[in-house]
Image (spheres, rainbow, N blue to C red):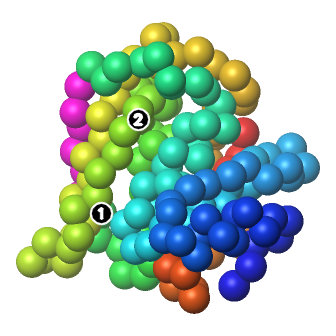
Amino acid sequence: MYMVGETYDDRQARAQGESGHRLVPHTADVRIEAWGTTRENCLVEAVHGMVDCFSDISAVRPTAIQRAQLSETSDDDLLAALLDEVVYRLEVPGQVPVDVELETETPGGAIDVRLAVADLSAVEITGAVPKAVSWHELHIGPGPYGWTCSVTVDV
């Protein structure tokens, strides 16, 4: 499956097993496209894409580790729940994920999420901070080179 506006270099990187993400222009919102060799790698890249859409964290070190458990029934629900967790961390405790790890399903069927976070005040803000995840055209699934996802973020 090709992504809209995907370049030859993007396809080559995916074919070689690389993970990544990119931001796609979208009217008044941000569209994130991400890919990875596994579902978990793809989800991690989606989080990185969401953080990249509004901030520069290149010089920021995490100050805390936050954990969450997600037990969604579908991959689309899991993508939305993970990105909603990022929005929650931004809005309530004022934290930005600077790194994320996902541990595959636990015996109870949940996914363990580990977020290395920094205070929002320590981050250089470069764009509008995400407010919500849109269900319109949200998708995650396997393809010929691994997993891909697309999601629109309301800013």
Does 35 appear above or below 53?
A: below
Q: Residues within 10 Å of mark 1 (few under 14, many from 20)?
A: some
To which residue does mark 2 refer? 97
User: In the image, residue 109 lies at what x, y percent?
Assistant: 19, 78
Q: Would residue 28 be seen by someone viewing this image from the given angle?
A: yes
Height in image: 43 above or below 17? above
Label 2 residue SS: strand
Which residue is tagged 1?
70
Residue 10 picture location, percent across and down: 70, 64
Secondary structure beneath dot 1 equals strand
Q: Can residue 135 be seen in this view?
A: no
Residue 128 lies left or right of residue 44; in this view the side is: right
Relative placement, left or right, of 108 versus 79 is: left
Residue drawn at x 65%, y 31% is 54
Q: Distance between the residues labelled 1 and 2?
A: 16 Å
Query: Residue drawn 34% across and 29% down?
Result: 117
Q: Do the residues labelled 1 and 2 touch (CB within 8 Å)?
A: no
